[in-house]
Image (cartoon, rainbow, N blue to C red):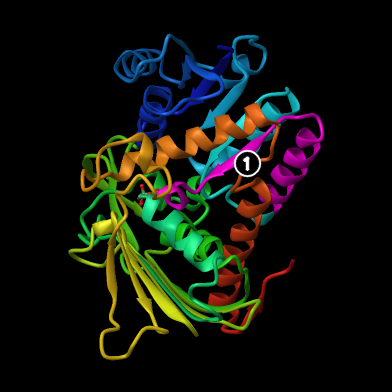
Amino acid sequence: MTDLGIGLIGYAFMGAAHSQAWRSAPRFFDLPLNPAMNVLCGRNPEAVAAAATKLGWTETETDWRKLLGRDDIQLIDVCTPGDSHAEIAIAALEAGKHVLCEKPLANTVEEAEAMTAAADAAAAKGIRSMVGFTYRRVPAIALARQLVAEGKLGTIRHVRAQYLQDWIADPEAPLSWRLDKEKAGSGALGDIGAHIIDLTQFITGDNIAEVSGQLETFVKERPVAAEHSGLAGTAGSERGPVTVDDAAVFLARFGSGALGVFEATRFATGRKNAIRIEINGSLGSLAFDFEDMNLLHFYDATEDARTAGFRRILATESAHPYVGAWWPPGHLLGYEHGFTHQVVDLVTAIADEADPTPSFADGLRVQRVLAAVEASSTSRQWQEIPE
Ligand code: SOE
């Protein structure tokens, strides 16, 4: 089978998640190309070498530009903070490499536009790109999309979406790159709000047309982290400013007229990674919570009122999206499986010479919603999302 040589840039949380996906995808799914884990790239030579051994990469590089000239690399996987996404992804596409880029696509709309233009130019030459909104590939979420696309919910009226975490609720939790606007672009809004914007647009097949929102930074200074690698480092005695939002809330109106209520926060004490989505349509409703990610709740409003009620669907049957390649019914899947499914769909699209989704254009659409929420928070006015 033909190899698809992979060069992965970044080896912290996302680098590890993507590495396990590249490792596991060909072992559970029959892929049309063989992902070869050729090169892991990071700036610190010792640290990247140790990570490569642990995560299963053959070689390392310390300069990402070197990957672009290598004949054994056909795909660049970008797992760096947002401030380098545009530069790396555009250079890679121009060098003829397929690109998988972590979310949010970029730190600004301008960068996302330039990336989308580069992706379109590359697509004309058969070079593919995808943005890593992995939660689309949780089987229960993919099933939700199927049910909506089949018309089971009828006309969508309400979209309720929350992404709740609490990892910086403690004011003494140290600064990390995710709390630095230069590196991350925004805070809870772009890091986790971006996921629920993408998920609700994906499930409903509809785009957000306008928003009215508010951002808040509850803790404005924090201990400087000794090390800026993962979600948080080790606290030192020095303090520094938090330059991003801790929480974002917004109202939305979708193109179809459906109303949306969104909330993204890192201050929901007790909620670790609760992505909660509820959609109400004229014929029924769907509800999902990532902290119970194998379940999808479905209410069929056309059923006999005496016996109708929310049905708890355990999305672990081989008839459910992606599940057939894994375990028997009831043997649950986890966070990492979404990353594996992402790789499966990307590799399949490359082999089929098809454009994978979510595309950079989808990432740009999310970026425009993020920018509109920020603008609305400042102006205290509703903001339209340009098409
Ligand atoms: C940190 O808030 C984070 O890792 C996000 O960056 C991810 O996208 C999300 O999946 C989990 O939380």
Image-based side of 306 in relation to 105, left or right: left
Q: Residues within 10 Å of mark 1 (few under 14, many from 20)?
A: some
Q: Nearer the viewer, residue 369 or 87?
A: 369
Image-based side of 167 in relation to 367, left or right: left
Quick check: is 131 in the magenta stretch?
yes
Q: Amino acid at mark 1?
A: Pro
Q: Residue at 23% across / 46% down in the picture?
A: 332
Can residue 194 be seen in this snapshot? yes
Considering every residue shown, the one lying at the far front of the view is: 304
> CB of residue at label 1: within 8 Å of ligand 1?
no
Q: Is residue 292 above or below residue 217?
A: above
Q: Nearer the viewer, residue 358 or 69?
A: 358
Q: Nearer the viewer, residue 212 or 239?
A: 212
Can you give x and y, in whole percent of width and height, for residue 83 in the image?
A: 55, 42
Q: Residue at 60% across / 10% down in the picture?
A: 72
Considering every residue shown, the one lying at the far left of the view is: 270
Q: Which residues are magenta?
A: 110-138
The mark total stands at 1
The secondary structure that most of the magenta stretch takes on is helix
Considering every residue shown, the one lying at the far bottom of the view is: 305
Q: Is residue 32 above or below residue 255?
A: above
Q: Residue at 42% across / 32% down in the picture?
A: 18
Can residue 80 be seen in this snapshot? no
Q: Residue at 30% across / 34% down in the picture?
A: 227
Can you give x and y, in whole percent of width and height, for residue 273 in the image?
A: 28, 56
| Quarter residue 69 falls in | top right
Q: Is residue 9 above or below residue 328?
A: above
Which residue was labeled with disc 1? Answer: 356
Quick check: is 373 in the magenta stretch?
no
